[in-house]
Every structure is written in C-alpha cells, then in structure tokens.
Image: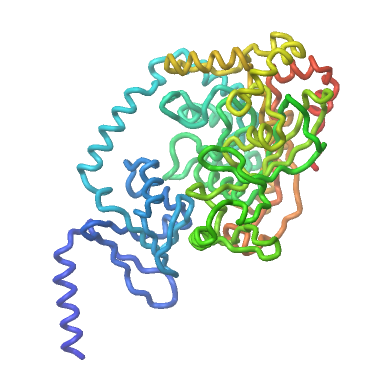
Amino acid sequence: IHFYTMFQVAFWKQTLSRLKPYHFSCYCTKSTTKTTPVIHTVSSSHHMFVVDNSRDSIRIDRYLRFQIPSLPHSLIERALRKNQVQLQSASSESQKVFGGTRVYPGDVITVPISWISTEFHTELQSKHQHIASKKLKLDSHPQLHSKILKQLENSILFSDQHCIVLNKPAGLAVQGGLHVGEFHLGSFLPSLMKRTESALKITKKHDGPSGGQLIKPSGDAPSGGVLVHRLDFDVSGCLIIARSKATANLLSRQFISKNIQKSYWGLVFSGVPKIHAARVKTVMDPKTGNIIAPAEFREEQAQIGKAAIQKKRNERGMETNAKSGGGRRFSPEVQEPDEYGFAKKAVTDYEVIRRKGQEIAWIELKPVTGRKHQLRIHCSQGLETPLIGDSRYAAVAMRNQRDKLDTIFGENWRTISEDYVEIPEAGSLKSKRKSEKLQNGNLHLYARWIDFEVPLIENTKKAIGNYKKWFEKEAREWHKNAVLYETPVKEPKKQNSVKNNETSSGLRLRVYSPPPEFFVRNLRTLGWNSELQQKLADRRIN
C-alpha cells in the first residue's frame, strides 16, 4: 500500500509539472461530503472551464462573455445551436445547453480550443474594427447628442436609489445596431446616470430608501445603468433602467416569474375586436414572427413527426400533458422553449376601451409573455385589427385604407411627432423610413404603465419603512407619475420560484407615462376626450 501511494504521488507531480499554470485550476465544492477536485484543462480540440462561486446561477452565454470578453454574442449563440458548447453539471451528466441555461458552482463547460487562441482573437478584432468604422459615432454629432440627452432627462418619470423609469421617446433604439451605431439608449445611460445621481444626495438618516446610504453600482457593474427590458424602435412609454447589477438581477427575476405587469394603449383600424375583453393565445414562429397556430393545438396538427417532437421535448425538458390530449406544457424546472427549432407561446390580454362603429377601436393591451413584436402581431394577425401606423405588419391594410383614415383624422394625422428622435442614418435607410413615416404616420402604440415590486437590496422591515418615509416626504415630485402600494406577502412556491430562499417585500410601484401628443390629438378628433381625461385621472390599483 505504501509503495502504491508513493507511486501515485510521484506520477501526479510529474504530470502536473508539465502543464502550464493557465491550463488548469482546481475547484472543491463547499459541502460536508468529500469531493474530488475538478481539473480544468485543455485537450487538442476543446478547452474546459469550471464554474466557481462568484458566477452562481448565471446564464451560460453571459458566463462565457465574462471568461472571454472579446467573444461576440452572436458567435456564442451559433456555437450553442451547433452543439459546440457542452455543459456537464456537477449533479448530472452532460446535457444540451441554450443561451438561457444557467450554470452553478462545479459545472464544467467545454468550448472549442480556437476561442482562446491569439490568432482567433486578432481576426475578431480586425472584423470588429471594420464594423465599428461604419457605425455612427456620438462625437461626430455633438449637437444631436446633447439634444437627445436633454430630452431623456426631461423624460424621467420616476427615480430612486435602485432604478429609473424612463419615458422612452419613439425613434430611439434601446440597443445598438449597424444602422443606429452609438445613437441608442444604452450609449446615453452613463451620462444620464451621472446627472441623476446628484439629485440623490441624502443628508438625513431616514431620508433614503435604504436608511440614508446611496446604493452605487457594485464592482462588476458598468459605470452607467443596466437595461432590464426593451421597447420597440417606434414605441414610446415606460422603460425600467437599473442603477446596479444587483438591482438588475432582482428585476430580471421578476420578469422571469411574471411578477411585473405592463399595460399598453393602442389605436387599431380595419375593424374592431369581436369580443370586448379576452385573451389572445398563439404560437409564433421565431424566425418569421408569424402566428402558426393557436396555443391549444395538438402535435398532430403541427406537421412535425412524432419522433422529432419527442426528441425535442426530451432535449428541452418538455412533458406531455395527457389531460389536454397531447398538448404541450412547460416543465417547472425548465424555462420556456427557446427559439432554436421550436415555436414560442405568446399570450396577451386585451380590452376595448372605446370603438367607432366597425372601423376604429381604442384598446388596452397587457402582455403576459414578452415575445418580439408580440402586441403588433397579435393585433394584426390574432385580432385581425392592425395598429395604425404599423408599416411592418399592416403595410397592405395601411395602403388600402389610407384614404379612409385621411377622411376620419384629416391629413395632419400623418405628421411626425415632435418628440420623435431622428438620427442621421444611412442614406437609403433614412429615405426609406422617412417615406414610410410620411405615408403611414406614427405607430399608435405606447407603454401606458408598468407595475413592479420595489427592488430592495436589503429586504427588511427597516428598509421597507425607510422607503415609505422617503416616498412620502422626499419623492413628492414623482407622485404625479408613480403610485406606491402594498400587497399581501405570499410564500414562494418551490417549483416556480427562481430561488427558494427569496422573499417578497409586498411593496410595489406603478409608474404611469403620459400619452404622446399625436395619440391625444387623434383621440380628441374621434370625440373621446372625456374618456381620455377619465382614464388619465384613474389611478386605481385592480
């Protein structure tokens, strides 16, 4: 036995001495049971990472971005689709992963070896510089930069030490792209946060929501705010921006658990919904965005082989609901199916506020899920009553009924709103969008209000009491836009909660956004001014 032990020690000493220091690291889980250290090393074609405690319960795509900052997100998603990234959980065998799969301490992630090579990153850097040279820069248009920044400052609906609720103007993208360059909301966040932090200086202990201490971003948080969700390019209204990553994490968990409610107002034409108030449930094609079937369809109607269905269900943790005749339901341990080869379920609640015959209706939309362009698709294809000004999903209807809309509203209804942000886009794209705006007018859809739980970092009775005092005494300037109220605290269910040890404070905020000027003008043209004033004054929490 002594000879065998000495042989093992000599063997591992010789083996580990040949490995370079950056090719391996050891990790031991903090548990009462003894575990063998996991060596994170490389092979001829793959490289392995071992998740530590600092990246607990993080998405795998974000974890890879932390480990390899120069890696583009599109490349990570492509590798996940092609099964080039493998995940071996500490409690189970290797499994198929997607961008939303979360990793935990002890998990081993295998990636292609080329991702850590110098030549690979040099090529990526050259491509990035080539693309960046074509993008618009903020420095190239200083007057427009200051104008948009001032407009964003005047559009703040609510601000505290945790987050900002902004009335995002139409025409401003939330995230960047090739055509918008740096002229998107994310580029203005650092400057916007610095200007709003000066208004949060606290002198008394009871003034602040957290006992008088200003919550600043943590060490790994960016210098500016953190985007939590998005709004479409042509949609204005309430948008939450977190001040730190800790707050963004709390708000993201509320979106996952559907604890955040949103309401939109819209004007539809070419008919009115047949039912006054109902729920639209559809399945949307992730590639085209079109509705492919109602949500309660059976697998036999999906034109997919039973073997392929069972294979995809097993890969994504789906189960068969025998009571619904073979319909789909989501496993509580797995998030909703992602976009790769699988349809997405979309659910929207709506209610008709006013209607004008069978031509135009003013409706309220409350999305239950958050799919891309969900409300616009549900109005145009689900209810068959498209939104006015929707040049993407209602181009044919707008072209056929433009004369009728001119008769109802007059020619001024197509006038572009003064709050609309016009950025210096590329010539062909700019002329195309401008012609669409002149023909179809503004998109008559905006985010009326958003309701969420106050993201308190320290969820204690003292913190809740301090926040109430701060809102009543020091936040009076926000009372015209925000309502603070309490709800009964419910114990989280184990299978639906993101973390079983999370508790709810029961303290919620509802922030309202004023309607755009063109929306108010057209409602008054239809003779609905009294109903509009009643709706704007109604702050009841249902």
Residue 165 seen in the figure: yes
Front-lying residue, 512 or 399:
399
Name the quarter where the C terminus is drawn.
top right
Q: Is residue 84 left or right of residue 44?
A: right
Residue sitting nearer the eye, 73 or 209:
73
Quadrant location, the N terminus: bottom left
Q: Is residue 257 left or right of residue 312?
A: right
Residue shown at 58% from the left, 57% from the top? 498
- Residue 522, percent from left and from top: 75, 17
- Which of the two residues, 330 or 230, is positioned nearer the viewer here? 330
Image position of 2 with respect to 270: above or below:
below
Is 6 drawn above or below residue 352 in the view shown? below
Q: Residue at x 64, y 11 (%)?
A: 415
| Residue 206 image offset from top left, x and y in percent | 66, 42
Using the rendered view, name the quadrant where residue 264 is placed: top right
Q: Position of residue 375 (x, y in %)?
A: 65, 35
Q: Is residue 453 visible?
A: no
Q: Vertical placement of 293 versus 447: above or below? A: below
Q: Nearer the viewer, residue 330 or 382?
A: 382
- What residue is at 78 percent from the left and 29 percent from the top? 272
Q: Residue at x 22, y 47 (%)?
A: 117
Q: Position of residue 154 (x, y in %)?
A: 61, 21
Q: Residue furthest top?
A: 411
How are the residues colored? rainbow
- Residue 41: image quadrant is bottom left
